[in-house]
Amino acid sequence: MTDIKSMTLEEITAALQELGEPAFRGRQVFSWLHRGAVSFANMSNLSRALREKLAAAYTITVPSVACKQVSRQDGTVKYLWRLGDGNCIETVLMRYRHGNTVCISSQVGCRMGCAFCASTIGGKVRDLMPSELLDQVLFTQLDSGLPVSNIVLMGIGEPMDNLDNVLRFLELVNHPEGMNIGMRHISLSTCGLIPGIQRLGQLQLQLTLSVSLHAPDSETRSRIMPVNRAYDVEDLFAACHDYFASTGRRISFEYAMIDGVNDSDAQADLIAKRVRGMPAHLNLIPLNEVRESPFHPSRRLHAFQRRLESHGITVTVRRSLGGDIDASCGQLRRRAMAEAGAQTPPPDAVRSR
Ligand code: SAH
């Protein structure tokens, strides 16, 4: 059985033509799928014979809500979706003045091993399919009734460790016959897999690349981000300069402020030195405390911000949303796994605190 929602319009059209159908059928099926059809039986403009043929050869992915939390403070909605194979993934819908932003996961778990991050503690279970990436946007919009205008690939997982599927997802979600979300409304965040940055740079997409920097010096970065031992921060900056040169797109750097680890003035000065020559945006994130990790939020956030700004760098401090729900970085999935035992998926429950 083939996962039909991971197929492009051209692929679906070709497959239907092989079944003797006219080209416009592809568009019909694609449009049903991208409006959230959960079975071929619902596709009322197709003949019954065709619906049966399709059902025999293809599957349609449909996630179910394993848990849903709505923040009383700011309306942030967090979903724990259960996938076809029982694995669970998190998606967060954030409500900003400029539109609703959905933060999606790219993998079940993560194998990057960042020392401050809860998403990586159980390792990577598997990659998500293009359909499962799309479903997070599609079913979050359908379930919440809130139109999604922006997407950030900043949930659990490393998008560039699943880049083929992520690129296909981008093509699908951007498609005029589908959800039609513009590339300029999409951000992709990476811990710094240089080959992925290079590949993305060649594609010249209009999306925003975010790089999780967290330290400008090799020693500190290797300590908190094992990926730095494979792709050193100096080479990472070179790849970022190349990316800017080929795309003209400003890169956004994520920087979780960790007390006594990455918050010195010397480190701010080194960041300034390394971004010189390209427009950069530093997004400082107050560290979210993770029970399993020894790190604490920095007490120098504003001093660090001022130091960066003194070098002419654009700095923002991330506002934390959904503080009353488990809205960040793998916390809901981990709690659900702990409650249910890692093997069995958590019970169906819609919770609202
Ligand atoms: N793997 C990708 C996508 C994850 S995005 C990446 O590394 O960029 C999630 C962002 O939140 C990353 O910048 C990540 O480093 C950051 N993050 C993870 N744990 C955090 C924590 N405890 N506090 C603050 N930020 C954290």
Image: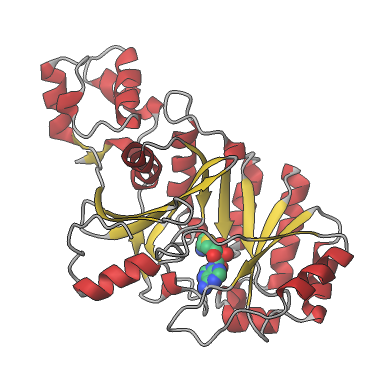
Q: Position of residue 219 (x, y in %)?
A: 68, 84
* Left or right of residue 285, residue 102 in this image: left
- Seen from this angle, which residue lies furthest front? 72
Q: Nearer the viewer, residue 33 or 309?
A: 309
The part of the image, by quadrant, that contains residue 272 is bottom right
Q: Please report the residue visible at 58 percent of the width from the left and 80 percent of the height from the top.
A: 224
Q: Please report the residue visible at 46 percent of the width from the left and 66 percent of the height from the top.
A: 329
User: Quarter of the image containing the N terminus?
Assistant: top left
- For ligand 1, the image quadrant comes to bottom right
- The colour scheme applied to this rendered structure is secondary structure
* Left or right of residue 264, residue 144 in this image: left
The part of the image, by quadrant, that contains residue 40 is top left
Q: Position of residue 303 (x, y in %)?
A: 79, 75
User: Quarter of the image containing the C terminus?
Assistant: bottom left
Image mark count: 0
In the depicted structure, whether residue 259 falls above or below residue 153: below
Q: Position of residue 162 (x, y in %)?
A: 45, 55
* Left or right of residue 105, residue 139 in this image: left
Q: Is residue 180 visible?
A: yes
Q: Is residue 23 visible?
A: no
In the depicted structure, whether residue 55 falls above or below residue 161: above
Q: Please report the residue visible at 39 percent of the width from the left and 59 percent of the height from the top.
A: 107
Q: Please report the residue visible at 30 percent of the width from the left and 30 percent of the height from the top.
A: 33
Q: Nearer the viewer, residue 278 or 49?
A: 278
Q: Nearer the viewer, residue 128 or 280?
A: 280
In the depicted structure, whether residue 191 falls above or below residue 91: below
Q: Position of residue 112 (x, y in %)?
A: 48, 71
